[in-house]
Amino acid sequence: MKRWFCVLITLLVAGCHWAVLAEDGAVFSLPGKSNELTPDLALVKVSKVCQITGEDSENKTQSRFGVWGTDLGSMTEMNGKVYMFCGDTFSDERNSDWRSNVLFVIEDDDPSDGLTITGTIPDKWGRAKELLLSRKSDHSQITVIPTNIFAVGSTLYCIFMSVKHWGDAGGVWECGFSGLAKSEDEGKT
């Protein structure tokens, strides 16, 4: 399974269109830095394989886990399973049942036809549970979003950011801090 993660990550990076914000200009002005894809990656063609979440997906996550939509989706492999930690999650198009993050379990050796979600950590109502709690208080802590997940042995680690305030549309927000969380029981605690 590790090989397909490398391919998936390569394809995701290759398919990105890089936008340079004004504040990024300083980074790209450094020697050797560029916002252009390398020639090798610029030639890679990317196409949609499938929808992973929502009721229209093969995983039927809305009826199974109360997940209509979510963002991000960092993945790692541990003990033969893939764990995908997603960010802000809602149960319907009206943004009901907001959870800052949820963890899916994927058991699928071949992502060429999609990713098969076999489980999640459920809350008391059977929905995907928010694992890293947030205050949901603007200008204090509006959300806690996982930015990466990795495993060492049988321990899951999650790097996360605490967002104080969502700014204007266009990807501007104020962060409070970043942190590292760990679970020694496959995300249950």
Image (tube, rainbow, N blue to C red):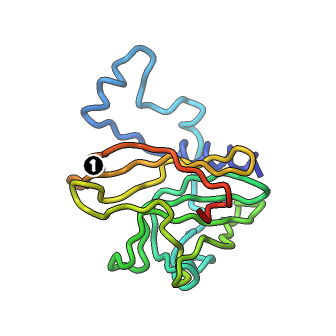
- The residue sitting at 54% across, 71% down in the picture is 53
Is residue 180 found left or right of 172 in the rendered image? right
Say if residue 55 shows up in the picture. Answer: no
> Label 1 crowding class (10 Å Cα cut-off): few <14, some 14-19, many 20+?
few
Q: Nearer the viewer, residue 8 or 43?
A: 8
Total marks shown come to 1
In the image, residue 127 above or below residue 106 = below
Q: Secondary structure at mark 1?
A: strand
Is residue 89 found left or right of 143 in the rendered image? right
Amino acid type for the residue under numbered disc 1: Trp
Give residue 147's position: percent from left, percent from top: 48, 48
- The residue sitting at 41% across, 14% down in the picture is 31
- The residue sitting at 21% across, 54% down in the picture is 139
- The residue sitting at 59% across, 42% down in the picture is 44
In the image, residue 79 above or below residue 14 = below
Say if residue 79 shows up in the picture. Answer: yes
| Residue, far top | 31
Give residue 128's position: percent from left, percent from top: 53, 74
In the image, residue 14 above or below residue 34 = below
Q: Nearer the viewer, residue 158 or 114?
A: 158
Give residue 21's position: percent from left, percent from top: 28, 37
Give residue 169's position: percent from left, percent from top: 24, 55
Q: Nearer the viewer, residue 28 or 145?
A: 145
Q: Nearer the viewer, residue 170 or 141?
A: 141
Residue behind mark 1: 173
Is residue 50 found left or right of 7 in the rendered image? left
Image quarter (top left, top right, bottom left or bottom right) of the C terminus: bottom right
